[in-house]
Structure formats: structure tokens, C-alpha cells
Amino acid sequence: GAGVSQTPSNKVTEKGKYVELRCDPISGHTALYWYRQSLGQGPEFLIYFQGTGAADDSGLPNDRFFAVRPEGSVSTLKIQRTERGDSAVYLCASSSPQSGTNTDTQYFGPGTRLTVL
Amino acid sequence: AQKVTQAQTEISVVEKEDVTLDCVYETRDTTYYLFWYKQPPSGELVFLIRRNSFDEQNEISGRYSWNFQKSTSSFNFTITASQVVDSAVYFCALSEAVQGAQKLVFGQGTRLTINP
């Protein structure tokens, strides 16, 4: 079946602009995660959704970052007033947590490479 | 706080050699999950394995094997008879095993290069 998809694959913007990054999870997966990966580093957690609600947004770096998942499927990560330090690959993952079994394997999309000039 | 350390930043070996990637973790939880992911040049993270903290049996899958040692908080990954296609960045990750979905804490990654 189809995996996690992310659009756009690349986004170049200017400092101060607003950007939206989209994630389409694996069909039927209720949990959705956003991570950020800077060059040469491991991914760092930003936010995760269980259904439509943000269950944990502790990784969002500041209030310029916001994410939504209005219908419990597609999610959009929104960044306002972008800064050069926001340049990174933004990864989305989805999973299907098994109730009562504590299992949760996350499957990742190809990422969106954001460059802020 | 949880932490994952992959001390080897880069490893380069010749094809057909065996290679071990080290992973050491820190957590105060008694129940947790450990993962390995592969990130080839295309950039997409590919899931390799998940291990529950209560299951210390080593696992083998083809040329891949994993050695989980709870006493030393390590979860090392060995590739036997390496191939050029194994070249990638490999990440070890940790999550708490609380009911339902959980965030992953990743190590810095080890860049593995297999030379023909």
C-alpha cells in the first residue's frame, strides 16, 4: 500500500515568509508525528497527533510553529515569519498504536527540505 | 531524560567485511522500546527493527543482527558480509512504552560507507 507522503519535497523561501508543509499519513494510521532533522543530526521530535488533537506539542521550538490535523488524516505544519535557522528537513511519520499492547512503529515519509534564504 | 548515543560518527569498510554499529541509551523507565532506522541517500527513514525492553533475545534477519544488552544499556547492530547497498546513515532510537503512540528520541546517527 501507499506509504507516508509529504509535499512539497523542496521548499525555498525568504526570511520572514510563511510556509506550509503537508503530510499524508498511511491510510488508517491514527497517530501522526512531525520531526525536524538538521544537517548531520538525528531527527528531533516536534509534535504528535492522536486523531485530530495534538497529544504532545512539547517539541515545537516557539510559537512561530503550529500544526493542525483537522480531520484526523492529513496534517499541515505551519511556520510563520521564517528564519534562516528554520532550514532543515521536516519529516512526518505515522503509526497505528495497538491498544493494550504498547506497540508503536513509526513509518516515515521522504521529508520536505526547507531552505530559508 | 532519555538519551541515545551513537559514538561512531562515520565508519568505512570494504565490501564483505562485517561491521558493528554501536548504540548506548539512557532512560529512567523500566519499560521502553528501542529501534534502528536506515536513512539511504534518498533521505527516507526505513524501519529495521523494534525491540521491547523485556525481550533481551538477540535477533537475526538475514545479514543483519542485533545484540541487546540491558546490563550495559546497549543495542548494537551488526551487518555481516556488508554490501555497497548497505551504505547509509543508521539511526538508533528510543521511546517510552506507555500506552499508545510515543515520540522517538534519536541518536546522532552513524554514516556507514561500504567500498567496493
Image: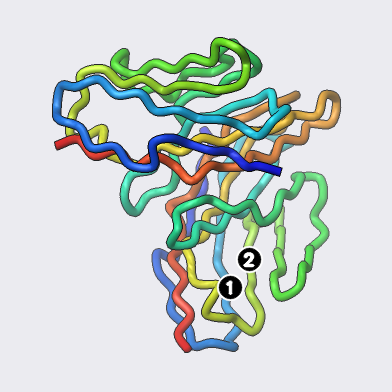
Q: Identify residue type, mark 2.
A: Phe
Left or right? Give the position of B62 relative to B34: right
Q: Residue at x 37, y 49 (%)?
A: A41
Label 1: chain letter = B
Q: Nearer the viewer, residue A66 or B75?
A: A66
Q: Residue at x 40, y 64 (%)?
A: B9
Residue wearing tag 1: B20
Task: Give coordinates of residue A75: x percent, y percent.
Answer: 51, 22
- Name the image quarter holding residue A27: top right
Q: Residue at x 74, y 29 (%)?
A: A97
Q: Secondary structure at mark 1?
A: strand
- Name the image quarter holding residue A30: top right
Q: Secondary structure at mark 2?
A: strand
Q: Total number of numbered labels?
A: 2
Q: Is A91 rendered above or below residue B107?
A: above
Residue wearing tag 2: B77
- Name the image quarter holding residue B94: top right
Label 2: chain letter = B
Q: Given contact means CB atoms under 8 Å apart, are the residues at marks 1 and 2 in contact?
A: yes
Q: Is A28 rendered above or below residue B58?
A: above
Q: Nearer the viewer, residue B25 or A31?
A: A31
Task: Give coordinates of residue B96: x percent, y percent.
Answer: 66, 33
Left or right? Give the position of B106 relative to A115: right
Tag of residue B92: none
Q: CA distance from mark 1 to mark 2?
A: 6 Å
Q: Is A49 rendered above or below residue B28?
A: above
- Badge 2 density bin: few <14, some 14–19, many ≥20, Cα 10 Å: many
Q: Identify residue type, mark 1.
A: Thr
Left or right? Give the position of A4 relative to B62: left
Task: Give coordinates of residue B35: x percent, y percent.
Answer: 64, 49
